[in-house]
Image (spheres, rainbow, N blue to C red):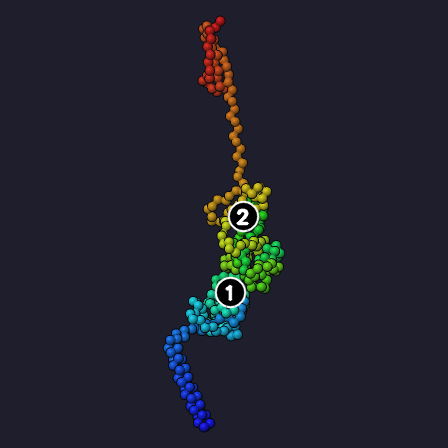
């Protein structure tokens, strides 16, 4: 009796397990048919950590992130990223772009941050010339030059100051070429400016005189035309500007240092007159003549002779 009961229970358990398995397969198949297909993704290389300006990208600086749609312009091949310098700081998990990397073969460091066609010019500064240490990387400055221009007429104006360059970017302050977002002062001896080759030639000559950096707002890109200043103009109330130098072959006239003083002409002298009494018959006539060289009378008056 007990064996029969155990057999019935075992048979019922097997039937229920089979039914549950069939039901599970049926439900799973229906869920698979109704589910949406898994979206296709693209592997994109991103920065594994923050990369500072001038850093050289290596294998450990890369990792892969799946994107549904890769960012526009992002570099997807590893060979296009490795062993290139960073020209713009790259944050962690940020894709790599061509404009943020130095050209292939340019290496890393400070030289890789110089754009093609531009030059880095080192200017010797002190606490005054370097705007009290606020001329740090990422700032924008104007360059002023002071000296005595050549030429006899120009030297009469004394010391002359004029704005040589405007809106020049500071690449580095001393050995620090990373941009300081807070603009903290850094007292250094050398500031590197980003200039064109022609501006580099002008700065080379300007260093033979006295130069001064003037800090400006990075958002202010306006180029202002200034007349310059001279020592003579300071003592003349600012009314005397910088004289133009006579350039050989130039037809432009040289502007005088000051307007010549025009003396007014002397007032005309009053002509001398001579009065003569003329008697004719019984009448007396008074005739007035201008000077001795005037033949015509000026006024005549007749009256009867008493």
Mark earlier in primary sequence (2, 1)? 1
Depth order, front residue of 282/228: 228
Residue 18: quadrant of the picture: bottom left
Depth order, front residue of 129/16: 16
Q: Which residue is mark 2?
A: 228
Q: Residues within 10 Å of mark 1 (few under 14, many from 20)?
A: some
Number of marks present in the image shown = 2
Q: Residue at 50% across / 57% down in the picture?
A: 198
SS for dot 2 = loop
Place of residue 161 in the rendered image (x, y in percent of width and height, measured from the top left): 56, 49
Q: Label for residue 139?
A: none
Q: CA distance from mark 2 to mark 1?
A: 37 Å
Tag nearer the camera, 2 or 1: 1
Image quarter hosting the N terminus? bottom left
Q: Residue at 50% across / 69% down in the picture?
A: 93
Q: In this picture, is 76 found above or below 269?
A: below
Place of residue 72 in the rendered image (x, y in percent of width and height, measured from the top left): 43, 67
Place of residue 23 in the rendered image (x, y in percent of width and height, measured from the top left): 40, 82
- Tell me if residue 208 can be seen: no
SS for dot 1 = loop
Q: Which residue is mark 1?
A: 88
Q: Residue at 47% across / 69% down in the picture?
A: 95
Marks 2 and 1 close (CB-CB < 8 Å):
no
Looking at the image, the residue that sits furthest to the top is 306
Q: In this picture, is 36 found above or below 53?
A: below
Q: Residues within 10 Å of mark 2 (few under 14, many from 20)?
A: some
Place of residue 159 in the rendered image (x, y in percent of width and height, measured from the top left): 58, 48
């Amino acid at each position: 009796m007990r064996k029969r009961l155990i057999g019935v229970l075992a048979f019922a358990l097997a039937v229920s397990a089979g039914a549950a398995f069939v039901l599970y397969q049926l439900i799973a198949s229906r869920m698979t048919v109704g589910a949406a297909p898994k979206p296709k993704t693209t592997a994109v290389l991103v920065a594994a950590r923050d990369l500072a300006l001038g850093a050289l990208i290596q294998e450990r600086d890369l990792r892969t992130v799946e994107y549904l749609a890769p960012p526009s312009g992002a570099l997807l091949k590893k060979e296009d990223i490795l062993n290139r310098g960073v020209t713009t700081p790259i944050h962690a998990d940020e894709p790599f772009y061509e404009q943020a990397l130095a050209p292939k073969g340019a290496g890393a460091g400070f030289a890789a941050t110089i754009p093609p066609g531009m030059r880095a010019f080192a200017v010797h500064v002190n606490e005054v010339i370097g705007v009290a240490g606020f001329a740090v990387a990422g700032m924008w400055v104007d360059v002023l030059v002071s000296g005595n221009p050549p030429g006899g007429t120009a030297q009469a104006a004394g010391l002359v100051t004029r704005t040589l360059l405007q809106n020049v970017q500071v690449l580095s302050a001393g050995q620090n070429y990373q941009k300081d977002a807070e603009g903290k002062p850094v007292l250094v001896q050398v500031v590197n400016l980003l200039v064109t080759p022609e501006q580099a030639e002008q700065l080379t000559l300007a260093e033979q005189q006295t130069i001064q950096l003037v800090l400006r707002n990075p958002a202010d890109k306006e180029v202002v035309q200034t007349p310059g200043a001279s020592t003579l103009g300071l003592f003349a109330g600012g009314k005397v500007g910088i004289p133009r130098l006579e350039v050989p072959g130039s037809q432009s006239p040289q502007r005088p240092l000051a307007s010549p003083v025009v003396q007014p002409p002397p007032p005309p002298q009053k002509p001398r007159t001579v009065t003569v009494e003329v008697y004719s018959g019984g009448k007396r006539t008074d005739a007035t003549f201008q000077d001795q060289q005037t033949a015509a009378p000026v006024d005549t008056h007749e009256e009867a002779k008493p």
